[in-house]
Image: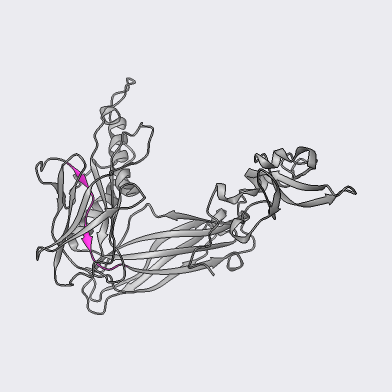
Amino acid sequence: MKVLRRIIISIALLTILYSCREAYTPPAIQASVSYLVVDGIINPANDTTTTIKLSRTVPINGAIGTKPETGAKVTVESDANASYILKETSTAGTYTSSAPLNLSQTGKYRVRIITSGNKTYLSDFVPVKDAPPIDTVTHTLPASGVLVFVSAHDPANNTRYYRYEYIETWTFHSAFSSSYIATTTRIVPRTPAQDIFTCWQNANSSDITLASSANLTQDVVNNTFVASVPAASEKLRIRYSILVKQYALTKDAYNFWALIKKDTEQLGTIFDAQPSQIQGNIHNVNDSTEPVLGYISAGRIQQKRIFIDRTDLPALWGIDDFYKPCYGNPNGGPNPHDPVEISKGNYIELYFGTYIPLNISRISSAGDTSFLGAERQCTDCTLRGFNKKPYFWY
Protein backbone atom coordinates (compact mmCIF):
# COMPACT_ATOMS: atom_id res chain seq x y z
CA MET A 1 0.00 0.00 0.00
CA LYS A 2 2.95 2.33 0.67
CA VAL A 3 4.16 1.66 -2.86
CA LEU A 4 0.82 2.51 -4.44
CA ARG A 5 0.61 5.77 -2.52
CA ARG A 6 4.07 6.72 -3.81
CA ILE A 7 2.65 6.71 -7.34
CA ILE A 8 0.27 9.53 -6.47
CA ILE A 9 3.08 11.48 -4.80
CA SER A 10 5.43 11.02 -7.77
CA ILE A 11 2.85 12.19 -10.29
CA ALA A 12 1.99 15.21 -8.17
CA LEU A 13 5.63 16.18 -7.74
CA LEU A 14 6.16 15.93 -11.48
CA THR A 15 3.26 18.33 -11.95
CA ILE A 16 4.99 20.80 -9.63
CA LEU A 17 8.32 20.51 -11.47
CA TYR A 18 6.71 21.22 -14.84
CA SER A 19 4.67 24.15 -13.54
CA CYS A 20 5.52 27.82 -14.20
CA ARG A 21 7.84 29.66 -11.82
CA GLU A 22 5.13 31.83 -10.31
CA ALA A 23 4.30 30.50 -6.86
CA TYR A 24 0.98 28.71 -6.70
CA THR A 25 -0.58 25.56 -5.34
CA PRO A 26 -0.74 23.02 -8.18
CA PRO A 27 -4.03 21.28 -8.97
CA ALA A 28 -2.46 17.95 -8.02
CA ILE A 29 -2.05 19.30 -4.48
CA GLN A 30 -5.42 21.06 -4.34
CA ALA A 31 -7.45 18.21 -5.77
CA SER A 32 -9.34 16.18 -3.20
CA VAL A 33 -9.51 13.04 -5.33
CA SER A 34 -10.19 9.91 -3.33
CA TYR A 35 -9.31 6.84 -5.36
CA LEU A 36 -9.75 3.36 -3.97
CA VAL A 37 -6.51 1.52 -3.16
CA VAL A 38 -6.68 -2.29 -2.98
CA ASP A 39 -3.78 -4.27 -1.51
CA GLY A 40 -3.75 -8.04 -1.06
CA ILE A 41 -3.64 -11.49 -2.60
CA ILE A 42 -6.19 -14.32 -2.68
CA ASN A 43 -4.53 -17.17 -0.81
CA PRO A 44 -5.93 -20.61 -1.72
CA ALA A 45 -3.96 -22.48 0.96
CA ASN A 46 -5.69 -24.53 3.64
CA ASP A 47 -3.47 -23.13 6.39
CA THR A 48 -3.44 -19.40 5.69
CA THR A 49 -6.24 -16.83 5.69
CA THR A 50 -6.78 -14.26 2.93
CA THR A 51 -6.45 -10.57 3.76
CA ILE A 52 -7.36 -7.57 1.61
CA LYS A 53 -6.59 -4.00 2.71
CA LEU A 54 -8.66 -1.08 1.44
CA SER A 55 -7.83 2.60 1.68
CA ARG A 56 -8.33 5.88 -0.14
CA THR A 57 -5.78 8.22 -1.62
CA VAL A 58 -5.41 11.49 0.28
CA PRO A 59 -4.16 14.96 -0.73
CA ILE A 60 -0.37 15.24 -0.56
CA ASN A 61 -0.56 18.29 1.68
CA GLY A 62 -3.25 16.74 3.89
CA ALA A 63 -2.93 16.17 7.60
CA ILE A 64 -3.25 12.38 7.37
CA GLY A 65 -1.07 9.90 5.54
CA THR A 66 -3.61 7.15 4.97
CA LYS A 67 -7.38 6.87 4.95
CA PRO A 68 -8.71 3.35 5.53
CA GLU A 69 -11.84 2.36 3.63
CA THR A 70 -14.10 1.09 6.38
CA GLY A 71 -17.52 -0.52 6.40
CA ALA A 72 -17.13 -2.26 3.04
CA LYS A 73 -18.44 -5.67 2.05
CA VAL A 74 -15.60 -7.75 0.61
CA THR A 75 -15.97 -11.21 -0.91
CA VAL A 76 -13.81 -13.59 -2.89
CA GLU A 77 -15.70 -15.17 -5.81
CA SER A 78 -14.83 -18.19 -7.95
CA ASP A 79 -15.67 -18.85 -11.59
CA ALA A 80 -17.78 -21.73 -10.28
CA ASN A 81 -20.09 -19.22 -8.50
CA ALA A 82 -18.78 -19.91 -4.99
CA SER A 83 -18.42 -16.93 -2.64
CA TYR A 84 -16.29 -16.38 0.48
CA ILE A 85 -16.83 -13.48 2.87
CA LEU A 86 -13.96 -11.37 4.26
CA LYS A 87 -14.84 -9.51 7.45
CA GLU A 88 -13.31 -6.24 8.63
CA THR A 89 -10.92 -6.76 11.52
CA SER A 90 -10.13 -4.47 14.43
CA THR A 91 -7.63 -2.79 12.10
CA ALA A 92 -9.67 -0.30 10.08
CA GLY A 93 -9.77 -1.09 6.37
CA THR A 94 -8.37 -4.62 6.77
CA TYR A 95 -10.64 -7.48 5.68
CA THR A 96 -9.78 -11.10 6.45
CA SER A 97 -11.39 -14.50 5.97
CA SER A 98 -12.43 -16.16 9.24
CA ALA A 99 -10.67 -19.36 8.11
CA PRO A 100 -8.39 -20.46 5.26
CA LEU A 101 -10.31 -20.53 1.97
CA ASN A 102 -8.86 -23.87 0.80
CA LEU A 103 -9.56 -23.09 -2.86
CA SER A 104 -9.24 -25.34 -5.88
CA GLN A 105 -5.96 -24.99 -7.73
CA THR A 106 -7.75 -25.20 -11.09
CA GLY A 107 -10.29 -22.44 -10.47
CA LYS A 108 -10.14 -18.73 -11.17
CA TYR A 109 -10.95 -16.10 -8.58
CA ARG A 110 -11.74 -12.43 -8.15
CA VAL A 111 -12.58 -9.94 -5.40
CA ARG A 112 -15.86 -8.05 -5.14
CA ILE A 113 -15.94 -4.85 -3.07
CA ILE A 114 -19.09 -2.92 -2.15
CA THR A 115 -18.17 0.24 -0.29
CA SER A 116 -20.20 1.94 2.41
CA GLY A 117 -21.03 4.50 -0.28
CA ASN A 118 -22.64 1.67 -2.29
CA LYS A 119 -20.06 1.64 -5.09
CA THR A 120 -19.18 -1.78 -6.46
CA TYR A 121 -15.70 -2.78 -7.62
CA LEU A 122 -14.64 -6.06 -9.22
CA SER A 123 -11.23 -7.47 -9.98
CA ASP A 124 -10.71 -9.62 -13.06
CA PHE A 125 -10.76 -13.38 -12.65
CA VAL A 126 -7.20 -14.62 -12.15
CA PRO A 127 -5.76 -18.15 -12.05
CA VAL A 128 -4.05 -19.62 -9.01
CA LYS A 129 -0.29 -19.35 -9.35
CA ASP A 130 1.62 -20.74 -6.37
CA ALA A 131 5.13 -19.54 -5.64
CA PRO A 132 7.81 -22.25 -5.50
CA PRO A 133 9.82 -22.59 -2.28
CA ILE A 134 12.61 -20.10 -1.63
CA ASP A 135 15.99 -21.78 -1.96
CA THR A 136 18.08 -19.38 0.09
CA VAL A 137 18.07 -15.96 1.71
CA THR A 138 21.67 -14.81 2.09
CA HIS A 139 23.52 -11.65 3.06
CA THR A 140 26.84 -9.99 2.36
CA LEU A 141 28.73 -7.43 4.45
CA PRO A 142 30.28 -4.66 2.36
CA ALA A 143 31.48 -1.58 4.21
CA SER A 144 28.15 0.16 3.59
CA GLY A 145 26.16 -2.37 5.63
CA VAL A 146 24.14 -5.56 5.17
CA LEU A 147 22.86 -6.55 1.73
CA VAL A 148 20.17 -9.27 1.53
CA PHE A 149 19.61 -11.53 -1.48
CA VAL A 150 17.12 -14.26 -2.38
CA SER A 151 17.40 -17.23 -4.74
CA ALA A 152 14.71 -19.62 -5.98
CA HIS A 153 13.84 -21.96 -8.81
CA ASP A 154 10.85 -23.81 -10.20
CA PRO A 155 11.72 -27.30 -11.54
CA ALA A 156 8.46 -27.31 -13.52
CA ASN A 157 9.40 -24.03 -15.29
CA ASN A 158 5.93 -22.64 -14.55
CA THR A 159 6.64 -19.53 -12.48
CA ARG A 160 8.93 -17.27 -14.50
CA TYR A 161 7.73 -14.04 -12.82
CA TYR A 162 8.48 -13.26 -9.17
CA ARG A 163 7.80 -10.46 -6.71
CA TYR A 164 9.32 -10.02 -3.23
CA GLU A 165 8.36 -8.25 -0.02
CA TYR A 166 9.90 -8.43 3.43
CA ILE A 167 9.28 -7.70 7.08
CA GLU A 168 12.19 -6.61 9.26
CA THR A 169 12.25 -7.24 13.01
CA TRP A 170 14.97 -6.19 15.43
CA THR A 171 15.44 -6.01 19.17
CA PHE A 172 16.79 -3.12 21.24
CA HIS A 173 17.34 -2.16 24.87
CA SER A 174 16.46 1.06 26.64
CA ALA A 175 19.24 2.92 28.47
CA PHE A 176 18.24 1.80 31.97
CA SER A 177 16.63 -1.35 33.31
CA SER A 178 13.69 -0.95 35.67
CA SER A 179 13.08 -3.64 38.29
CA TYR A 180 10.14 -1.86 39.90
CA ILE A 181 6.86 -0.32 38.86
CA ALA A 182 5.01 2.51 40.61
CA THR A 183 1.28 2.38 41.24
CA THR A 184 -0.83 5.11 42.83
CA THR A 185 -0.34 3.53 46.23
CA ARG A 186 3.00 1.75 46.27
CA ILE A 187 6.10 0.62 44.42
CA VAL A 188 6.24 -3.10 43.66
CA PRO A 189 8.61 -5.45 41.78
CA ARG A 190 8.08 -5.50 38.04
CA THR A 191 6.94 -8.83 36.54
CA PRO A 192 8.57 -10.29 33.39
CA ALA A 193 5.46 -9.34 31.39
CA GLN A 194 5.95 -5.73 32.52
CA ASP A 195 9.56 -5.55 31.36
CA ILE A 196 10.35 -2.30 29.54
CA PHE A 197 14.07 -2.80 29.00
CA THR A 198 13.92 -5.18 26.01
CA CYS A 199 11.69 -4.39 23.05
CA TRP A 200 11.26 -5.18 19.36
CA GLN A 201 10.34 -3.15 16.30
CA ASN A 202 9.00 -4.11 12.86
CA ALA A 203 9.27 -2.45 9.46
CA ASN A 204 7.70 -3.46 6.15
CA SER A 205 9.30 -3.15 2.74
CA SER A 206 8.21 -0.18 0.64
CA ASP A 207 10.19 -0.74 -2.56
CA ILE A 208 9.15 -3.06 -5.37
CA THR A 209 11.44 -6.03 -5.99
CA LEU A 210 10.85 -8.13 -9.10
CA ALA A 211 12.69 -10.96 -10.80
CA SER A 212 12.07 -12.86 -14.01
CA SER A 213 13.46 -15.95 -15.69
CA ALA A 214 11.31 -15.49 -18.80
CA ASN A 215 14.39 -15.17 -21.03
CA LEU A 216 16.20 -18.13 -19.50
CA THR A 217 16.06 -21.81 -20.36
CA GLN A 218 15.63 -22.77 -16.70
CA ASP A 219 13.20 -21.12 -14.28
CA VAL A 220 15.86 -19.85 -11.89
CA VAL A 221 16.31 -16.50 -10.14
CA ASN A 222 19.68 -16.25 -8.47
CA ASN A 223 20.84 -13.73 -5.85
CA THR A 224 18.08 -11.19 -6.42
CA PHE A 225 18.78 -8.12 -4.28
CA VAL A 226 15.99 -7.62 -1.74
CA ALA A 227 17.05 -5.25 1.03
CA SER A 228 19.88 -3.30 2.61
CA VAL A 229 20.58 -2.14 6.15
CA PRO A 230 23.10 0.68 6.67
CA ALA A 231 26.13 -0.24 8.76
CA ALA A 232 25.24 2.38 11.38
CA SER A 233 21.58 1.36 11.71
CA GLU A 234 20.25 0.65 15.18
CA LYS A 235 18.53 -2.41 13.65
CA LEU A 236 21.91 -4.18 13.78
CA ARG A 237 22.87 -3.23 17.32
CA ILE A 238 21.74 -6.48 19.01
CA ARG A 239 19.85 -8.83 16.71
CA TYR A 240 18.14 -8.38 13.36
CA SER A 241 15.80 -10.63 11.42
CA ILE A 242 14.27 -10.38 7.96
CA LEU A 243 11.36 -12.44 6.64
CA VAL A 244 11.37 -12.53 2.84
CA LYS A 245 8.06 -13.27 1.08
CA GLN A 246 7.97 -14.63 -2.47
CA TYR A 247 5.00 -14.25 -4.83
CA ALA A 248 4.48 -15.91 -8.20
CA LEU A 249 3.00 -13.55 -10.80
CA THR A 250 1.27 -13.89 -14.11
CA LYS A 251 2.86 -11.97 -16.96
CA ASP A 252 0.14 -9.29 -16.72
CA ALA A 253 0.69 -8.88 -12.98
CA TYR A 254 4.45 -8.66 -13.51
CA ASN A 255 3.97 -5.94 -16.13
CA PHE A 256 1.74 -4.00 -13.72
CA TRP A 257 4.29 -4.09 -10.92
CA ALA A 258 7.15 -3.31 -13.33
CA LEU A 259 5.27 -0.21 -14.47
CA ILE A 260 4.77 0.95 -10.90
CA LYS A 261 8.43 0.28 -10.15
CA LYS A 262 9.52 2.39 -13.11
CA ASP A 263 7.23 5.29 -12.25
CA THR A 264 8.05 5.39 -8.54
CA GLU A 265 11.82 5.06 -9.01
CA GLN A 266 12.46 7.15 -12.13
CA LEU A 267 10.18 10.13 -11.58
CA GLY A 268 11.70 12.97 -9.65
CA THR A 269 13.40 15.40 -12.03
CA ILE A 270 12.27 17.34 -15.07
CA PHE A 271 14.46 15.08 -17.22
CA ASP A 272 12.60 11.91 -16.24
CA ALA A 273 9.95 10.26 -18.37
CA GLN A 274 6.32 11.25 -18.07
CA PRO A 275 4.32 9.00 -15.73
CA SER A 276 2.84 5.93 -17.37
CA GLN A 277 -0.85 5.16 -17.47
CA ILE A 278 -1.05 2.60 -14.67
CA GLN A 279 -3.94 0.20 -15.11
CA GLY A 280 -4.58 -2.58 -12.61
CA ASN A 281 -7.17 -5.33 -12.80
CA ILE A 282 -9.76 -3.77 -10.47
CA HIS A 283 -12.65 -1.69 -11.85
CA ASN A 284 -15.71 0.27 -10.80
CA VAL A 285 -18.51 -1.76 -12.41
CA ASN A 286 -20.57 1.38 -13.09
CA ASP A 287 -17.78 3.78 -14.06
CA SER A 288 -14.95 2.33 -16.10
CA THR A 289 -13.17 5.71 -16.15
CA GLU A 290 -12.61 5.79 -12.38
CA PRO A 291 -8.99 4.93 -11.48
CA VAL A 292 -8.55 2.12 -8.97
CA LEU A 293 -5.06 1.41 -7.63
CA GLY A 294 -4.04 -2.19 -7.10
CA TYR A 295 -3.73 -5.62 -8.67
CA ILE A 296 -5.33 -8.77 -7.29
CA SER A 297 -3.45 -12.05 -7.76
CA ALA A 298 -4.12 -15.54 -6.38
CA GLY A 299 -1.62 -18.05 -5.09
CA ARG A 300 0.29 -19.44 -2.14
CA ILE A 301 3.08 -17.28 -0.77
CA GLN A 302 6.47 -18.74 0.15
CA GLN A 303 8.66 -17.20 2.82
CA LYS A 304 12.00 -17.68 4.56
CA ARG A 305 13.57 -15.94 7.56
CA ILE A 306 17.17 -15.32 8.55
CA PHE A 307 18.73 -13.81 11.67
CA ILE A 308 21.84 -11.65 11.91
CA ASP A 309 23.48 -11.12 15.31
CA ARG A 310 25.78 -8.27 16.26
CA THR A 311 28.57 -10.80 16.66
CA ASP A 312 28.18 -11.70 12.97
CA LEU A 313 29.10 -8.17 11.92
CA PRO A 314 32.44 -6.32 11.67
CA ALA A 315 33.52 -5.06 15.07
CA LEU A 316 34.51 -1.70 13.60
CA TRP A 317 30.99 -0.80 12.47
CA GLY A 318 29.90 2.23 14.48
CA ILE A 319 26.28 1.28 15.07
CA ASP A 320 23.99 4.06 16.30
CA ASP A 321 22.51 3.98 19.79
CA PHE A 322 19.22 5.85 20.12
CA TYR A 323 19.71 6.09 23.88
CA LYS A 324 23.23 7.49 23.79
CA PRO A 325 22.09 10.90 25.15
CA CYS A 326 20.76 9.12 28.26
CA TYR A 327 24.21 8.19 29.55
CA GLY A 328 27.57 9.77 29.32
CA ASN A 329 28.39 13.37 28.60
CA PRO A 330 30.86 14.09 25.77
CA ASN A 331 31.58 17.48 27.37
CA GLY A 332 32.32 15.98 30.77
CA GLY A 333 30.42 16.57 33.97
CA PRO A 334 27.02 15.22 34.99
CA ASN A 335 24.43 14.16 32.42
CA PRO A 336 20.98 15.78 32.88
CA HIS A 337 19.44 12.37 32.11
CA ASP A 338 21.32 10.50 34.83
CA PRO A 339 19.15 8.57 37.33
CA VAL A 340 18.26 10.46 40.49
CA GLU A 341 17.43 9.28 43.98
CA ILE A 342 13.74 9.43 44.84
CA SER A 343 13.03 9.44 48.56
CA LYS A 344 9.77 8.87 50.39
CA GLY A 345 8.99 12.58 50.33
CA ASN A 346 8.80 12.85 46.55
CA TYR A 347 7.43 9.45 45.55
CA ILE A 348 4.70 11.34 43.72
CA GLU A 349 7.19 11.93 40.90
CA LEU A 350 7.23 8.19 40.38
CA TYR A 351 3.47 7.80 40.63
CA PHE A 352 2.83 10.28 37.84
CA GLY A 353 5.56 9.06 35.55
CA THR A 354 8.10 11.87 35.76
CA TYR A 355 10.55 9.14 36.66
CA ILE A 356 10.42 5.37 36.52
CA PRO A 357 11.88 3.48 39.51
CA LEU A 358 14.94 1.43 38.60
CA ASN A 359 16.00 -0.22 41.83
CA ILE A 360 16.37 0.42 45.53
CA SER A 361 19.15 2.87 46.32
CA ARG A 362 19.02 2.73 50.13
CA ILE A 363 16.84 2.02 53.14
CA SER A 364 17.01 4.50 56.01
CA SER A 365 17.34 3.58 59.68
CA ALA A 366 13.63 4.35 59.99
CA GLY A 367 12.86 1.76 57.33
CA ASP A 368 12.05 4.25 54.57
CA THR A 369 13.06 3.08 51.10
CA SER A 370 14.59 5.35 48.50
CA PHE A 371 14.74 4.43 44.82
CA LEU A 372 16.82 5.43 41.85
CA GLY A 373 14.52 6.84 39.20
CA ALA A 374 15.19 7.64 35.55
CA GLU A 375 13.28 9.55 32.91
CA ARG A 376 10.66 7.57 31.03
CA GLN A 377 12.21 8.42 27.66
CA CYS A 378 15.42 6.68 28.73
CA THR A 379 13.80 3.73 30.49
CA ASP A 380 10.57 2.71 28.78
CA CYS A 381 11.34 0.94 25.49
CA THR A 382 7.61 0.56 24.74
CA LEU A 383 7.60 4.23 23.74
CA ARG A 384 9.34 3.02 20.56
CA GLY A 385 8.41 -0.64 20.20
CA PHE A 386 6.63 -3.59 21.78
CA ASN A 387 7.80 -5.72 24.71
CA LYS A 388 6.11 -9.01 23.82
CA LYS A 389 8.70 -11.39 22.40
CA PRO A 390 7.77 -12.45 18.84
CA TYR A 391 6.83 -16.10 18.57
CA PHE A 392 9.67 -16.75 16.09
CA TRP A 393 12.38 -15.13 18.21
CA TYR A 394 14.84 -17.38 19.96
The residue shown at (13%, 60%) is 125
Of 359 and 283, nearer the camera is 359
Of 225 and 123, nearer the camera is 123
x, y percent for residue 164: 34, 62
Q: If the image is split into quadrants, where does the C terminus sit?
A: bottom right
x, y percent for residue 248: 26, 66
- Please tell me whether residue 260 is drawn above or below residue 336 in the rendered image: below
- Please tell me whether residue 374 is drawn above or below residue 77 in the rendered image: above
- Please tell me whether residue 266 is drawn above or below residue 34 in the rendered image: below
Taking 137 as reference, is 307 left or right? right
Of 30 and 269, nearer the camera is 30
Main secondary structure found in the magenta portion: loop
Q: Quadrant of residue 67?
A: top left
Of 185 and 175, nearer the camera is 185
Question: Does the stretch in magenta take in 295?
Answer: yes
Identify the image's colour scheme: rainbow, by chain, secondary structure or one colour: one colour
**Residue stretch in magenta:** 291-301
x, y percent for residue 225: 39, 62
The residue shown at (14%, 51%) is 122
Q: Quadrant of residue 131?
A: bottom left
Taking 359 as reference, is 127 left or right? left
The residue shown at (29%, 35%) is 12
Question: Does the stretch in magenta take in 326?
Answer: no
- Most distant residue in the right direction: 365
